Amino acid sequence: MNKKIVHTCPERMPQFSLRQGLCTIAAGVALSFVPKSLSAGVPDDRRIVAAVFDGASLLFAGQNLSRSDDDGMTWTTLPAQNAGSILSLATHPARPGRILAGLASGGTSLSNDGGHRWETRASGLPVGAVLAISVASDQPDTVYAAVKGDGLWKSEDAGLTWVLVMDRPWLEDAERDPLALASVDLATGMGGIWIYAGTETGLTRVPDCFCRWQGVKPGNAMNALVSGDAPPPEFPLPPGAAILALVSAPSAPETLYAALQSGLWTSQDAGVVWSRLVEEAASAVAVHPTSANHIAAAFDSGLKQSRDGGVDWTAISIT
């Protein structure tokens, strides 16, 4: 049975193991208990590992899964007994109510009613935690999942069946697990689409031909493929830093947000140049489907949202 929670919003890294090092939410933000199946593999009930907008509704996942349909004024704790331990969430503006989750126990789960009821979807996926999940920006039934220790998998039927499309990216002399995925609709991609991956050592991407992981550089995909010695961007994300969450704004795909231990970062040119919005450890970030400036994030000090691209913030309280 769902628990309704009412409050008033106040005014104003070697192999990286399953989100190891995520920041914890301040003690003032209390998350309610949920069935054990959801909390398995999530070691701290104040830790937020994923955030997502479902239309105008906002969801945060930690030891529980919480949803607000009224801009954070009230919250529902979703049971999600079949969702398992959630590591990542994904939605698509063209499929309101559909939420996909990547699970620490392996496989994915899908809900078509906003997170109230779930079904497991893992046919063809190898055994291993699904560290990151993303819905293709131009095809709402196409889903990508990064499996720990394996590679990048693709489903064209909303997770019913899966096929391997890409090995893990090779960075810093080793294969690296994607900790975050984002499908980015850009004219520079082959077919218009890039798959961006945030790893334990930084950012990479692959065009939807799945020909080669490559660094984020100016120009189109073909130019990048033939100019592997092109200079790196002048203002990249901090080198060697784990990217814990990564999103592209559906209404302005070139606008990206990334959550790192060093803070919340943004790029206005599809990841070439980055600037830091908040100098505080962040573990999750979500962007509204129709407003690139409306973001929600989890920080060391708590959950917050901004409507002006990260200039001003309002605290979110789930009590």
Image: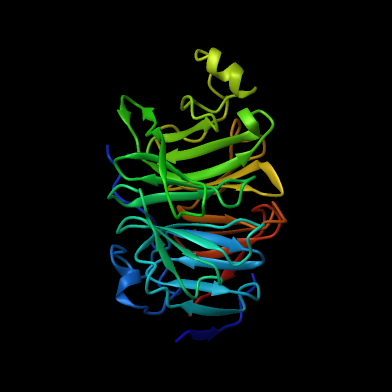
Asked whether the viewer can see residue 230, the reply is no
Left or right: residue 281 versus residue 126 is right
> Is residue 318 positioned above or below 265 on the image?
below
> Is residue 220 positioned above or below 60 on the image?
above
Front one among 125 and 197: 125
* Residue 135 drawn at (x, y percent): 55, 50
The count of marks equals 0
Q: Residue at x 62, y 47 (%)?
A: 139
Asked whether the viewer can see residue 38, the reply is yes
* Residue 248 drawn at (x, y percent): 61, 46
Q: Quadrant of the N terminus?
A: bottom left
Q: Residue at x 60, y 74 (%)?
A: 72
Front one among 301 and 56: 56
* Residue 203 drawn at (x, y percent): 47, 35
> Is residue 36 positioned above or below 306 on the image?
below
Front one among 270 and 139: 139
Left or right: residue 125 versus residue 181 is left
Specify the color scheme.
Answer: rainbow
Left or right: residue 243 versus residue 191 is left
* Residue 69 drawn at (x, y percent): 62, 75
**Quarter of the view holding residue 92:** bottom right
